[in-house]
Amino acid sequence: MSTKKRPNIEFPFIQPWFATYHEGCMGVIAKNNPASDNWFFNKAILLCTRPKILFADSGSSAKVNVYGPHTGAIPFLQNVWLQANFLRNCVKEVIQTMLEQGYYIRFSGVDDYYVEGKSWYKKKHFSHDGMICGVDNDTKEYIIAAYDSQWVFRAFRTPQAGFVKGYKSIIDNGGTATLNAAKCLDVPVELNISEIKEGLISYLNATSEPNEKDEVFGAAVIPYVIEYLNRLKSGEIPHERIDKRIFRLIWEHKNCMLARLKAVENHCGLSNEASMAYSPIVKTADNIRFAYMKHCAKQNDGLLEQIKDKLLEMTETEVGLLQAFCERI
């Protein structure tokens, strides 16, 4: 048997446009394509929520998300899926081989309890996901991208032994684990002005009534977020069930929107009037998410009223700016 040392590998962790909920890993991989921003500018326009999930007082499903940029939709990602339950005794070898062949590895079905640095490490057993970005065989660690103990999506090191134990814990208790080897292809993506305009108009004109899938899109999502805050204040949604991620996603959406406006202005030879006017919206969204995090920590209902006021004002301003922008392109 060969005793040749396997190489250490570390792929770049590039901050994605959307790191909230379940699409951060895919976004990191996509960033390896220099033209990937254009794809997100073309596609990632509509906010989306499902009121039945938003108002539920339990579960880890996305309360508010961006419609479109999910893993299977990106044409320049190459994906190979493995049902990892069959790899119980060779999972480290498979991971090493995938990395050596240039693949990031998105995983699901690994018990956070055993994975040092993860959200629920040594706190509770929880089947969770993330992505392996590299391996250090000298220190016997993986470099993974995931939510850390502070619920921040970032890259950090974790012992291989704990990761494998977390993987085996789930499958030994009847759960399912998967490994998704994924790499970014160098496929050109052009900025599509007509698609962006169509998406912005849909964002502005979306109906407030849920469709047959209980989905609401665009700016019409915001009144539902306001109602979510109302239910938090009334106690209908218990404070211990609060979702800390909602306003980070909204801030990410505004940040991407600003970059989109700048890209369109540059492409069309327009002045930077729209992007300059939109910049304060990003700042307001950032202030809102920090105020919300303070409420999450201290349950200050006065902050909820301030958030509601700022959110309504921000949305009204945004709608007016985007309507004017659509008339220019």
Image (spheres, helix red, strand yellow):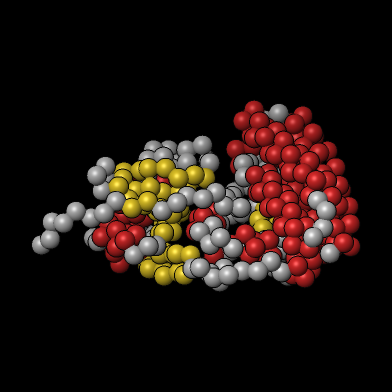
- Image x and y of residue 118, in percent: 43, 43
The residue at the point 34 percent across, 59 percent down is: 99
Q: Nearer the viewer, residue 142 or 321?
A: 321
Furthest residue in direction left, as rendered: 1
- Name the quarter where the N terminus is drawn: bottom left
Towards the viewer: 46 or 125: 46
Residue 136 drawn at (x, y percent): 30, 47
* Labels in figure, total: 0
Left or right position of 72 against 2: right
Q: Is residue 13 above or below residue 203?
A: above
Q: Image quadrant of residue 326?
A: bottom right
Query: Where is the C terminus found, in terms of image quarters?
Result: bottom right
- Residue farthest to the front, as pictured: 269
Quick one: 177 or 9, which is closer to the camera?
A: 9
Instruction: Describe residue 4's horizontal placement relative to residue 12 as left or right.
Output: left
> Is 22 placed left or right of 145 in the picture?
right
Which residue is found at the position 29% from the left and 51% from the top? 8
Q: Position of residue 271 (x, y in %)?
A: 83, 53
Q: Looking at the image, can residue 186 be seen?
A: yes
**As drawn, is 92 to the left or to the right of 130?**
left
- Residue drawn at (66%, 31%) of the image: 294
Whole-percent x, y for residue 65 in the image? 66, 56
Q: Is residue 206 above or below residue 112?
A: below
Residue 125 in view (yes/no): no
Please report the residue visible at 53 percent of the width from the left and 41 percent of the height from the top.
152
